[in-house]
Each structure stands twice: as C-alpha cells, then as structure tokens.
Image (spheres, rainbow, N blue to C red):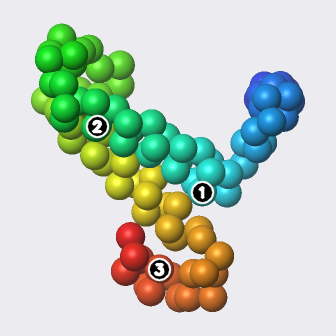
Amino acid sequence: MATVLCKVNSALAKAGMRPVTTNNLLFYYTPMKGCVAYSALSIQVFTPELFQNFKFLLVPEYISLTNACLLNTMTGVGLYLYSRPHLAQAAPRDKLIYW
C-alpha cells in the first residue's frame, strides 16, 4: 500500500500538486472537488436536457444529480472556509458557524 501511495505522490508532485495526506485531502482536494461540482451544478441548472440520461457511477438512482452536486459543493465550500487563516484562532464551534 505504501508503494502505491508513493507512486501517486510522485505523480502528483510532477504535476505540481500537493501529496496525498489527510490534511490535503480535506482542505485542498475536497474544495477542488466542490468547485467542479459547482460547475456541474450550474450547467445542470441552466441546461437540464444535457443530463437527462446521465448515469451515476457511485450515486444511487434515487438521488438526483442536482442534490449530489449541491452536497459536494457545500462540503467543498465549508471545508475551504473552515481551513482559512483568518479562522485559525477561532474555536471549532465558531468555525462551524461559517459552514
């Protein structure tokens, strides 16, 4: 497992991205995923006919694309704001108010 992680981290370093750590997954890659989800959400809202026959890979069929994108967007934005330097000295309870 460690060799796979080393290979992934070296490939990410070559691409100019951060290595895979818990902190980077939560506060770097999840907000990036939220940005992509926000883009998909805006496209889906303005042109819903593009996604009429869209098949989900990991999301069950009873969850709509709009709800899945909104959940990912809000999670990404929340974790981005939670990790900002201006909230570094705040208590976790106060940080959650901005989420």
Helix, strand or loop under label 1: helix
Q: Are marks 3 and 1 in contact (CB under 8 Å)?
A: no
Q: Return the x and y of residue 91 as percentages of the image width and height.
A: 53, 88
The residue singled out by tag 1 in the image is 27
The residue singled out by tag 2 in the image is 41
User: Which residue type does callout 3 highlight?
Assistant: Lys
Mark 2 Cα-neighbour bin, 10 Å: few <14, some 14–19, many ≥20: many
Q: Is residue 63 left or right of residue 15?
A: left
Mark found first going from the N terminus, 3 or 1: 1
Residue found 63% across the figure and 88% down from its top:
89
Looking at the image, residue 84 lies above or below residue 53:
below
Q: Nearer the viewer, mark 3 or mark 2?
A: 2
Helix, strand or loop under label 2: helix
Mark 1 Cα-neighbour bin, 10 Å: few <14, some 14–19, many ≥20: many
User: Which residue type does callout 2 highlight?
Assistant: Leu
User: Which residue type does callout 1 highlight?
Assistant: Phe
Helix, strand or loop under label 3: helix
Q: Return the x and y of residue 6 as percentages of the image width and height.
A: 85, 31
Number of marks in the image?
3
Residue 8 falls in image quadrant: top right
